[in-house]
Image (cartoon, rainbow, N blue to C red):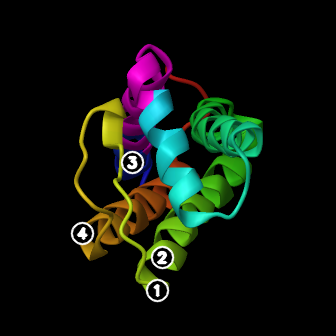
Amino acid sequence: MDLLGSFGLGLVVAVYGFAFVSKVISPPAWVRLRGDVLQILPIGSTAAALVVSCLLLAEAGTLLGLIIPALRVVGVALSFALAAGVFVIILRGQVVSCNCFGKTRTALSVRHLVRNLLLGVFAVMSLFAPSGFS
């Protein structure tokens, strides 16, 4: 299981790392994401910026939680929390861009939910990875 755990850890860290960095280095991605938050939540612009920041912190927390062996359970929980957010948006029938990796404008769909749930499964596999990357 060590090999599968290491694979799961590497995959999830790569995906969440790329997603986080691509959003952080792209100011237009922040603006689009804030616009999408405003579209689905009846809040002001400042609150929407806070929600976007919390979303990015959740992605970063997932990443760090999986990298730091003592926090892997937190990383797994955050990974599933992000999938739950996608589920709620789909369940409400809201049309919101995924902003995946800071670039795509594809509407969130079941495909995104399945991808995030699979990342959650790989995150669970990371619990069986050796401590550290050595």
Q: Which residue is mark 1?
A: 91
Q: Which residue is mark 3?
A: 8
Label 4 neighbour load within 10 Å: few <14, some 14-19, many 20+? few
Task: Give the alpha-carbon distance from disc 3 to disc 4, as whole Å.
Answer: 19 Å
In the picture, measured across the screen, residue 118 lies left or right of residue 83, that is: left
User: In this rendering, is residue 1 above or below 51?
Assistant: below
Q: Of the residues shown, which amino acid type is indicated by label 2?
A: Phe
Task: Give the alpha-carbon distance from disc 1 to disc 3, as whole Å.
Answer: 28 Å
Disc 1 on helix, strand or loop?
helix
Q: Are marks 3 and 2 in contact (CB under 8 Å)?
A: no
Residue found 48% across the figure and 41% down from its top: 33
Q: Of the residues shown, which amino acid type is indicated by label 1?
A: Leu
Mark in the foreground, 4 or 1 = 1
Q: Magenta span covers which residues?
A: 9-29
Magenta region includes residue 122: no
In the picture, measured across the screen, residue 43 lies left or right of residue 62, that is: right
Q: Which residue is mark 2?
A: 87
Label 3 neighbour load within 10 Å: few <14, some 14-19, many 20+? many
Q: Of the residues shown, which amino acid type is indicated by label 3?
A: Gly
Q: Are marks 1 and 2 in contact (CB under 8 Å)?
A: yes
Mark sitting earlier along the chain (2/4): 2
User: In this rendering, is residue 100 above or below 124?
Assistant: above
Numbered tag placed on residue 111 in the rendering? 4
Q: Position of residue 23 (x, y in %)?
A: 44, 27
Mark sitting earlier along the chain (4/1): 1
Residue found 54% across the figure and 77% down from its top: 88
In the picture, measured across the screen, residue 22 lies left or right of residue 56, that is: left
